[in-house]
Image (tube, grey):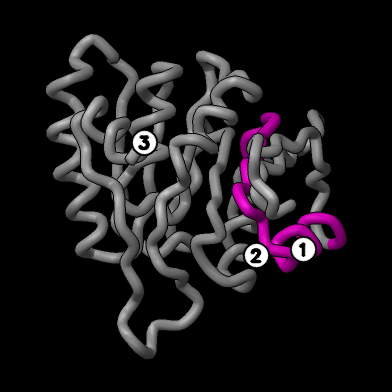
């Protein structure tokens, strides 16, 4: 009920789930981050005006629109499912009508996550368990190569992080946990945001 109310406030439609067709490996079904969780993220993680967020597996764009609405920062959504991507673009048209005063850009890119070219402006990356750890490794590798080329501090925001993601970041990358944001009232200990940061060079 609350999710639908927030969707109406933003002028978008992001509820529901969508499974991939049989035979599609490595990509997980679409399920949006709850607005309750996003509210806790916005209360406890202060995005800076210089941040540019990339949401991998953005679905219909809920995280993209919410962060743009709250913080007025550039946000890019990466989506591999063609139908879901089209719905995100349709949501953008409706959202822009309600948020004309926010000049920060919103962009949606239709491609597999591992093929997205990391921009030197991209410094905050969001994941809600969108794909297998194999693809996650490739994406993180792309991020690290981008940082080697254009030195900057970057953050990863993982919601409901799977153990495979956490183990890979802990044992195979220089990323370190900088914060954890739990969702009040949730019994499942995994129902939280884990923030990873790449230390400054």
SS under mark 1: helix
| Residue at horizontal 65 percent and vertical 58 percent from the top | 141
Q: Is residue 31 left or right of residue 50?
A: left
Tell me the quarter of the image containing the C terminus: top right
Sequence-earlier tag: 3 or 1: 3
- Name which quarter of the figure residue 178 lies in: top right
Residue at 63 percent across and 69 percent down: it is 133
Measure how far apart labels 1 and 2 are at the Cα level: 8 Å
* Residue at mark 1: 168
Q: Is residue 1 magenta?
A: no
Residue tagged 2: 137
Q: Is residue 86 above or below residue 164?
A: above
Nearest to N terminus: mark 1 or mark 2? 2
Give how far across and how far down residue 96 sits, in percent.
Answer: 18, 25
Residue at mark 2 to residue at mark 3: CA–CA distance = 34 Å
Say which residue label 3 marks: 2
């Amino acid at each position: 009920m609350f999710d639908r109310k927030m969707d109406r406030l933003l002028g978008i439609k992001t509820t529901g789930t969508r499974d991939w067709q049989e035979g599609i490996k490595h990509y997980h079904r679409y399920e949006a981050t709850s607005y309750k969780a996003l509210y806790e993220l916005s209360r406890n993680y202060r995005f800076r005006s210089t941040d540019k967020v990339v949401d991998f597996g953005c679905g219909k764009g809920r995280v993209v629109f919410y962060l743009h609405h709250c913080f007025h920062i550039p946000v890019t959504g990466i989506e591999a499912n063609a139908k879901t991507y089209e719905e995100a673009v349709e949501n953008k048209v409706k959202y822009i009508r309600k948020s004309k005063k926010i000049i920060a850009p919103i962009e949606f890119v239709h491609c597999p996550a591992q093929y997205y070219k990391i921009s030197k402006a991209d410094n905050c990356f969001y994941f809600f368990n969108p794909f297998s750890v194999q693809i996650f490794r490739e994406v993180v590798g792309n991020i690290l190569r981008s940082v080697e080329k254009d030195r900057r501090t970057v953050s990863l925001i993982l919601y409901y992080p799977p153990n495979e993601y956490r183990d890979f970041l802990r044992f195979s990358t220089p990323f370190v946990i900088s914060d954890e944001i739990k969702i009040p009232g949730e019994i499942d200990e995994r129902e939280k945001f884990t923030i990873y940061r790449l230390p400054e060079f």
